[in-house]
Image: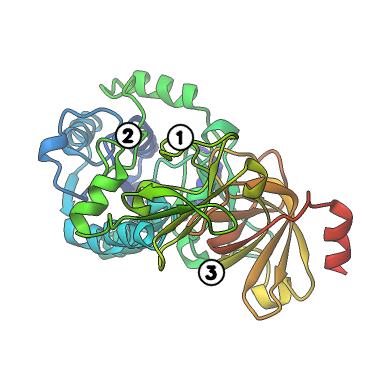
Amino acid sequence: MPNSLDIDGRPSETRVVVAMSGGVDSSVTAALLAEAGYDVVGITLQLYDHGAAIHRKGACCAGRDIHDARAVAERIGIPHYVLDYESRFKEAVIDRFAESYVAGETPVPCVECNQSIKFHDLLDTARELGAKVLATGHYVASRALPGGGRGLFRAREAERDQSYFLFATTRAQLDVLRFPLGDRSKAETRELARRFGLAVADKQDSQDICFVPTGHYAQVIERLRPGASAPGDIVDLDGSVLGRHDGIIHFTVGQRRGLGIAAGTPLYVVRLDAASRRVVVGPREALRTSRIRLRDVNWLGDGPVDAALERCREVFVKVRSTRPPQPAWLCRGETGGVEVELIASEDGVSPGQACAFYDAAEGQARVLGGGFIASTVAAARPARAGAAVAMAR
């Protein structure tokens, strides 16, 4: 077992709860801990009505996944429990997802799920069961820091790194969370699953948001918020009306297709104005963002955030899970709060998205925290490194 687990106590006398989604990653996590001799308890969360989705591929926490998690637990000889979290999940994740879309934002529900359900409610359950540690199959690493406490680090395999979705993890939670797969590749995980004889060894990875089985977000929002598809105008940057739309929930910042208007040059969704129900469109260059204002910032770096940002701090940030970290300056805003100045501007940044901070651009960089994007400032011209340096002074 990797030493990075840092679990105090004799394995046979140490209880570990494993969050088992029914996929190969969490299954191997449970099998590794059981093989190492820990007192492992598997828990699967029923998060939504999974009956209709039992045969759907590419989603987690559905009926098929609960069955698979139970089969893995039986195979490796550990107790397994299914907890009904449907009402809590709807309140903390699905309802917030719908409200965010209605407000013209682009939410990241996986962050909310980790923050409010897996690393809060499930962690409380693990403590009630007498567990010293809650382990998950996320591709991210947790390591002891020289000055005490634990830090969160990017996974060894950059393509699998899930740290973007875990920036809201608190320091107190990190003390009891472990991620055995952070130093492994996906290929190694699947090979381990075969060695353990797990039927999920070649199971497809989850891809879509689990409670949006078809990928059509607007259908879910319309069901939860009747009337959310109120029509409005599509306007250009000067406010001139170019056409009509059937609801801002059908659009996201950066979208080009499906606008339903004819123009001599390609147009993109630049901004969504929920109050006036306007979809603002413009040329691609209008999507460039140079400054981001954040809300609900979680700081995982050394010391308190106020001291850390007494002066602007050079960091690397991700505003999308699929893009590599890019250089930026992290600063206190003129009116309070935290702002990010992108050294190289970014396309299509939308309120509601997450912004994660790192101390390096490559390798297993440490996660310094992150926040949700409250608003953006367009780049009048390409941001320059020299301007950011001057700002930091």
Q: Nearer the viewer, mark 2 or mark 3?
A: 3
Which numbered disc, 3 or 1, marks the residue that appears first in the sequence?
1
Which numbered disc, 2 or 1, marks the residue that appears first in the sequence?
2
Mark drawn on residue 295: 3
Q: Is residue 135 left or right of residue 264?
A: left
Q: Which residue is nearer to you in this view: 251 or 362?
A: 251
Q: Residue at x 30, y 63 (%)?
A: 92
**Pointer 2 local density, CA inside 10 Å: few below 14, some 14–19, many at least 20:** many
Q: Nearer the viewer, mark 2 or mark 1?
A: 1
The amino acid at mark 3 is Arg
Q: Which residue is nearer to you in this view: 60 or 135?
A: 60
**Pointer 3 local density, CA inside 10 Å: few below 14, some 14–19, many at least 20:** some
Residue linked to disc 2: 27
The amino acid at mark 2 is Ser
The answer to whether any part of residue 123 appears in the image is no
Residue 108 screen position, x and y as percent: 43, 52
Q: Nearer the viewer, mark 3 or mark 1?
A: 1
Residue that lies at the very extreme toward the bottom in this rendered image: 335
SS of the residue under disc 3: strand
Question: Colour scheme of this structure image?
Answer: rainbow
Rounded to the nearest angstrom, the CA distance separating label 3 from label 1 is 30 Å
Q: Residue at x 29, y 20 (%)?
A: 197
Mark drawn on residue 372: none
Which numbered disc, 2 or 3, marks the residue that appears first in the sequence?
2
Are the residues flagged by discs 2 and 1 in contact, CB closer than 8 Å?
no
Residue linked to disc 1: 257
Are the residues flagged by discs 2 and 3 in contact, CB closer than 8 Å?
no
The answer to whether any part of residue 251 appears in the image is yes
